[in-house]
Image (tube, rainbow, N blue to C red):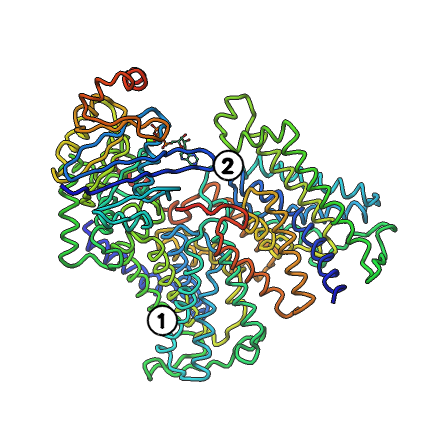
Amino acid sequence: MTNTQRTLGAAAVIPIVAVALVVIFPNQQAFLAQIAITALLVLSLDLVVGFAGLATLGHAAMYGAGAYAAALYSLHVWAEPLTGLVVGILAGGLVALVSALMLMRAHGLTFLMMTVAITQIIYEIVNKSRAVTGGDDGLYGIMMQPLFGRFEFDFYGRLAFWYAAVVLWLVFLLLRHIAASPFGLTARAVRDDGGRVSSLGGGIFAHRVALYTLSGGIAGLAGALSAQTVQVVGLNTLSVTYSAEILVMLVMGGTGRLWGALLGALVFMMIHHYAAEVDPVRWMLFIGAMLVMIVLFLPKGLFGGLEAAVNRLREGART
Amino acid sequence: MNNLLEVRNLSKSFGGLQVTRNVDLTIAPGDRVALIGPNGAGKTTLVNLISGVLDPTGGEVMLDGSKVTALSQRQRAHRGLIRTFQITRLFHSMTVADTLRVAAIQKNGMTYRFGWGGRSADLIEKSVERVLTDLRLQDRRDNDVSLLAYGEQRLVELGVALIMEPRVLMLDEPAAGVPQSESHIIMDAIENLPAELGVLFIEHDMDLVFRFARRIIVLVSGGVFCTGTPDEIAANEDVRAMYLGEAS
Amino acid sequence: MLSLIASILIDGISYGLVLFMVSVGLTVTLGLMRFVNLAHGTFAMVGGYAAATFVTALGLPYVLALILAAAVAGIIAFGLEIALVRRVYARPELDQVLLTIGLVFMGIALSGMIFGNSLVPIRLPEFLRGSTDLGFRSMPTQRFVPLVLGLLSLAGIWLLFERTRFGVKLRATVDNPRAAGELGINTRRVYAAAFAIGAALAGLGGVAGAELLPVEPYYPLKYLVLFLAVVAVGGPGNMAGSFVAAILLGTVETAGKYLAPEFATIALYALMLIVLSWRPEGLFQRSSKT
Ligand SMILES: Nc1ncnc2c1ncn2[C@@H]1O[C@H](COP(=O)(O)OP(=O)(O)OP(=O)(O)O)[C@@H](O)[C@H]1O
Ligand SMILES: [Mg+2]
C-alpha cells in the first residue's frame, strides 16, 4: 500500500462506520451522537496519555469547561452552534494552558495528583457559583439555532449525530496529520526521553504545554458538542470519576495510536449502554475486572490485540 | 586561536562527596582532546557539568568567551555544545530515521511545525540521509532503534550528535560496548568529523586514545592529574603506574 | 480564640494521624518500591468492614477485632501482591495506575454487593463511648484511638525500619534489587511482606479513623486523593515527610471546616497544588534538576 492509499483508507473508516451504525441502530441516533462525542474526548485524552505519556485523572476539567462555556454562550450570548464550538475550544484550551503552566514540570504521581487537584478545584468553584452555573442542578434549557442557519436540531438526534460525527472525523484527520508532523514526532521523543530532547536543544516544557493545550482545546470542543446536543450540562462533566472513565475507554482501546481511542469509546459505550441499566454495581465490577485483564493480558489494548491478530493471520497466509 | 570552550576551576559535590575538583580545561576549534581516568574518576560528571545537565558547586563554563554556567542544557545545545551519552539514550519507540529526524527538527527550530512541507523539511531529509550514509546505516533506516544491535545503537547515538552540527562535541565512551567487528565504523566516523570541530572524548581503550587524541587530560578523583600530548602521557611514569598499567 | 486554635489542633492532629496510618504503607510502595498504587485505600476499607463484622456479627471485643482487621487487610494484600501486583512492578507507571484503578472499582463493587451501600458503623466498647472533658471543651473519647494508634504505628514503623533485619533487607532491596538478591535476600518475599505490612497499617487506620472517614463502598475512591496527597506532599518514600504532611493536611482541612466550611475542600486542594507546583518531589525532598 502506498502512503496515499493508506491515508485515504484511514480517512474512510469513520464515515463508513458512521453509516453502518445508523443502519444498524436506526432509532438510537441520540445515543450514537454521544458515542461520537465521547470518542472525540477520548481522542483528545490520547494526546496526553499516549503522545505525552502522562497518566491523568483530570481530563474532564477541560471537557467540562468547554461544555459550560458553550452552554452559557448559547444561553446568554448567541445560540449559533458553530461559534459555540469555537467558544468551547477556547475554554478548554484556556483551562489546559493555565493548568499546563503548573503541571508540565511534574510527572508521575505528582502530575496525577495535580490533575486531580485542579479538577476538584474547578468542580468546587462551579458547584459554588450557583447563580451562573446552576450549581448541582446544572444548566438546562439550551436551545440551539439551526446549523448553518438551515438545519434544525431534531428531537431524535439525527442532526446531532451527523454534526458530531463530522466534527469527530475532521479532528481525527487533523490529529493524524499532526501525529506525523515535526510537532508530533517531537512529542513522542519527549515522551520517550525528555532529557535527551533537552540535550538536543528542544524545549520540552513549552512543547508539553503546547500539546496539553491542543488536547484541552479538543476536549473543550467535545464538551461544547455535548452541551449543544444533549442540551443539559451537569457537574459530572467536570468530575474526576468521569476522567477515570474516559481513561478506561482509552486504555481499553489502546493508547498512542488514535485508532485505539475510537475503538475504546465505541466498545465501552456500547457495553455500558446495554449493561449498566441492568445493575450499576455489577457494571463497576465488570469495568474493574476488564481493566485488570487488559493490563495483564492485552497491554496494547483492543486495537493492539486486533492488530497482532491480523498480523498473525497475514503471516499464516503467507507461509 | 580563540578558545571555543573554556572551563575554569569547576567543582561539584554530591552531598559530602566531591566528584569534580577545580578542573580547568580549554578546547579550541579543531582540538581532539581525550579525557581519561579510572572508573569513577568523574569523567561523565565533568561532561554533565559542561553540558548543563548538572549545576556545578563552583567555577565557570565559558563558550566563545562568554559565561554559560547559568544557562540550561538546552541553551548550551543551541550554541553548538553537544554531547553523547555513555549509556545510549535513544527514543525507544522510534525508527532510526525518525530518531535522527527528531534531532534535526530541534536543530532547525521546527518543533512547532504541524506539517512536513517547505524547504526546511527537505533540509531535514537531506541531513538525515547524509548522516545515514556517513555511518553506513542506510539499511537500518526503518528499523526500530530498540531492536538494533548495541554497536549500531552507539552509531545512531553518534549520528544524533552529528545531525546537530556541533561546534564542540563531547563523546562519552563512543565505542564502549561496540564489538570489534563494528568499531571501525565508529572510528571512521570520528576520524571524519569536520576539521574545525572541537572534540572532547572520554575513552578507556588506549589504542583509540592514542590514535585520535592530540592532547590527553588525565582525571583522577575528580581533579586533573596531568595533561599533555600523547607522547608525554605515555612517558609519564605516574600515569603508567596508576592508570595505563591498570587498563592494559 | 485560643480554645478554637486548640480545637483545630487536636482534631486536626488526630485526623492527620489517621491519614498517616492509612498512607504510610503507600509511601513505601510508591516511593521505595516504585509502584503506583491507587488501590491502597481499599485496604483501609477492608479493615473497617472486617472490624465491623468481627464486632457486630461475631461479638469479638473491640481491641481484638482491631488487630484481626489489620491482619485481614494484610493477608488480602499479600494475596493480591502475589497474584497481580508483582506482575506489574517492572511495567510503566500508566499500567500500574490502570491495574490499581481496576482493583478500586472491583473493591467498590464487591463491598457494595456484600455490605450494601450505606455507612457501616463499628460498634465501640463502653470505655470509648461518650466524651471526655478536656477543660475547654469536650471531645468524643473515640478520637483518642487514632491519637494512640497513630503514635504507636509511628514508633513501630521506625523500629521495623531501623532496628530489625527486615528493615535492613527492605532497604537493601529497594536500593539495589540485584545486589540484594545476590546477598541471598529473597527480594520477592521482602516486597510482598512490605506491601502486606503497609496494607495492615492501612487496615488499622481504617478502623481507627472510622469516625472521621466512615466506612462505605466508595471509601477507596472518595479518600484516594487525600492519601495520595499525603505521600506526594511528604515526598514519596519519605516516612517522616509523610508524617508531617499528614498532620499538615489534616490540620489544614480541619481548620477549613471550622473556619470556612464552604471552602474547606478548595483550600485543601489549593494547598496541595501550590506545594506540588513549588516542589514537585514533595515538601521534604531536595528538588532534582532534569
Ligand atoms: N548523581 C550522583 N549522586 C551521587 N554521586 C554521584 C552521582 N553521579 C555520579 N556520582 C559519583 O561520582 C563519581 C564519579 O562518577 P562518574 O560517572 O562521573 O565517573 P566516570 O569517570 O564517568 O566513571 P566511568 O569510567 O565508570 O564512566 C562516582 O563515584 C559516582 O558514584
Ligand atoms: Mg562515565
Given the image, on which type of amino acid does mark 2 rest?
A: Arg
Seen from the viewer's position, the closer of residues B73 and B152 is: B73
The residue under label 2 is C87
Q: Chain of mark 1?
A: A
Which of the 4 image quadrants contains residue A150? Answer: bottom left
The residue under label 1 is A162
Q: In terms of secondary structure, where does tag 1 sit?
A: helix
| Whole-percent x, y for residue A185 in the image | 28, 51
Q: Is residue C141 left or right of residue C270?
A: right
Instruction: Look at the image and tell me in which quarter the C terminus of chain A lies.
Output: top left
Q: Is residue A14 above or below residue C282?
A: below
- Whether residue A309 is visible, yes or no, is no
Seen from the viewer's position, the closer of residues B125 and C256 is: C256
* Mark 2 beta carbon near ligand 1 (under 8 Å): no
Real-space Cα distance between discs 1 and 2? Answer: 44 Å
Seen from the viewer's position, the closer of residues A176 and B78 is: B78
Total marks shown come to: 2
Q: Is residue A121 left or right of residue A305?
A: right
- Whether residue A67 is visible, yes or no, is yes
Q: Is residue C68 above or below residue A146?
A: above
Are dots 1 and 2 on a single chain?
no
Question: At 53% across and 38% down in the image, what residue appears?
Answer: C33
Which of the 4 image quadrants contains residue B95? Answer: top left
Which of the 4 image quadrants contains residue A33? Answer: bottom left
Q: Is residue A72 above or below residue A276?
A: below
Q: Is residue B40 left or right of residue B210?
A: right
